[in-house]
Image (tube, helix red, strand yellow):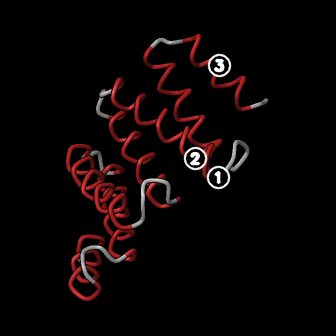
Amino acid sequence: MHRQEWKLTEKVLGKEHPSTLVSMNNLALVLGSQGKYKEAEVMYRQTLQIMEKVLGKEHPSTLVSMNDLAAVLGSQGEYEEAEAMHRQTLQLKEKVLGKHHPSTLDSMNGSRLCYKVNGSIRRQRRCIDRRYS
């Protein structure tokens, strides 16, 4: 269903239309929830690349896609890349949305979980301290 929606949206509106990008991100989300992590990763990377080009690196939709890609990387055990992407997303969200925006706080949580899995208790603690400062 999501794949059909994406293809139809792409055909009608074009590959770089924001609605097409939302459809691509939604498909990647569904693939990840089905445990098809590699396929989800490919879709997220394609979406992110186009979003950065069309919307810009600091657009809120781009930041959501970055965060989603980081999560699927973590699900595959790619913890170092996931942690780096979570960190980058968090920095951009703090800059664009502010430190206390709900989306920024979600990214802090994603970073904290990544640090926990990676065994970096010191970084996890700093992330928690930042959240409440």
Q: Which secondary structure lies at badge 2?
A: helix
Q: Amino acid at mark 3?
A: Arg
Q: Quadrant of residue 27?
A: bottom left
Residue ID at (39%, 39%): 70
Residue picked out by circle 3: 126
Q: Amino acid at mark 2?
A: Lys
Which is nearer the eye, 98 or 106? Answer: 98
* Numbered mark located on residue 93 in the image: 2
Q: Are marks 2 and 3 in contact (CB under 8 Å)?
A: no
Q: What percent of the width, then of the height, locates residue 44?
A: 30, 53
Which is nearer the eye, 78 or 63? Answer: 63
The answer for how far apart the CA atoms under marks 1 and 2 are is 5 Å
Q: Are marks 1 and 2 in contact (CB under 8 Å)?
A: yes
Q: Quadrant of residue 53?
A: bottom left
Label 3 Cα neighbours within 10 Å, binned few <14 / some 14-19 / many ≥20: few
Q: Quadrant of the C terminus?
A: top right
Q: Amino acid at mark 1?
A: Leu
Left or right? Give the position of 41 relative to 91: left
Residue picked out by circle 1: 97
